[in-house]
Image (cartoon, rainbow, N blue to C red):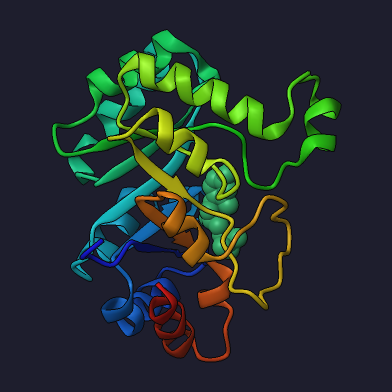
Amino acid sequence: MNHNPIYVALDLPRLDAAEALARRIKDHVGGIKLGLEFFCAHGHHGVHELAKVGLPIFLDLKLHDIPNTVAGAMQAIHVLQPAIVTVHASGGRAMLEDAKAAAGEHTKVVAVTVLTSLDDDDMSAIGYANRASDQALRLAELAHGAGVDGIVCSGHEVGDIRRQWKDGYFVVPGLRPADGVLGDQKRSVTPRAARDAGASVLVIGRPITRAEDPVAAARAIEGTL
Ligand SMILES: O=c1ccn([C@@H]2O[C@H](COP(=O)(O)O)[C@@H](O)[C@H]2O)c(=O)[nH]1
């Protein structure tokens, strides 16, 4: 891998703080991930402002609705020219197909399989018979068949999915350095383990954004890859 695969998750409530942090760490990450917290607070304006930093923008909106609605949302964000957008694989094949058809030519559509904050106990509480890793594999197959560019999964299953979908684009969040605090993440590996297993993009938020020295934290993680 010859480019920096780290996308920093800027889950910060304030636009000025997010922009300032992005500028400080821009030499140690490969892209910026903006999620629901940021988009609900700052919308298109916020994305335009962060785009000025000069890194690719990943819009982690996790769209999940009927096909027509998701396609409309994809068209509405077209103007922002995101490098990556997320939808939920469990929205079904037609939704995934329509999301991909509505996306801009340069936007990768990746389907979230099983959130990294869920473990096997959560799966049964939700009503899934499968273990988290089996469900992630099943949804990855669905996403592959629907023609999207890749999936979001944990570092626990990315290796198995990579063996079956060789040219897929795989986003892995929930990553923690070896001594990192898990917080709400339950299916976590180190950034290096995820990269070695076949991740295309490494999403890292709090280990960088909440570090005492975010530049040093980003640089240290980059150095492990
Ligand atoms: O399964 C998923 C899908 C998305 N995310 C997002 O990634 C970041 C992780 O942030 P950390 O602070 O490094 O835990 C966050 O924006 C999530 O919305 C995920 O964690 N798991």
Residue at the spot x=31%, y=49% of the render? 44
Q: From the top left corner, tell me how far across and down residue 32 is, in percent.
A: 34, 62
Residue at the spot x=56%, y=61% of the render? 175
Q: Is residue 7 above or below residue 90?
A: below
Residue at the spot x=72%, y=42% of the render? 118
Q: From the top left corner, tell me how far across and down residue 171 is, in percent.
A: 42, 46
Numbered label tally = 0
Quarter of the rendering occupied by the C terminus: bottom left
Q: Nearer the viewer, residue 22 or 76?
A: 22
Q: Is residue 201 above or below residue 221?
A: above
| Residue furthest to the left | 105
| Residue furthest to the front | 163
Is residue 158 toward the left or the right of residue 98 in the image?
Answer: right
Q: Nearer the viewer, residue 215 or 66?
A: 215
Is residue 144 toward the left or the right of residue 105 in the image?
Answer: right
Is residue 19 toward the left or the right of residue 108 in the image?
Answer: right
Q: Nearer the viewer, residue 1 or 116?
A: 1
Q: From the top left corner, tell me how far across and down residue 163 is, in percent.
A: 42, 34
Q: Quadrant of residue 148?
A: top left
| Residue furthest to the top | 94
Residue at the spot x=57%, y=90% of the render? 212
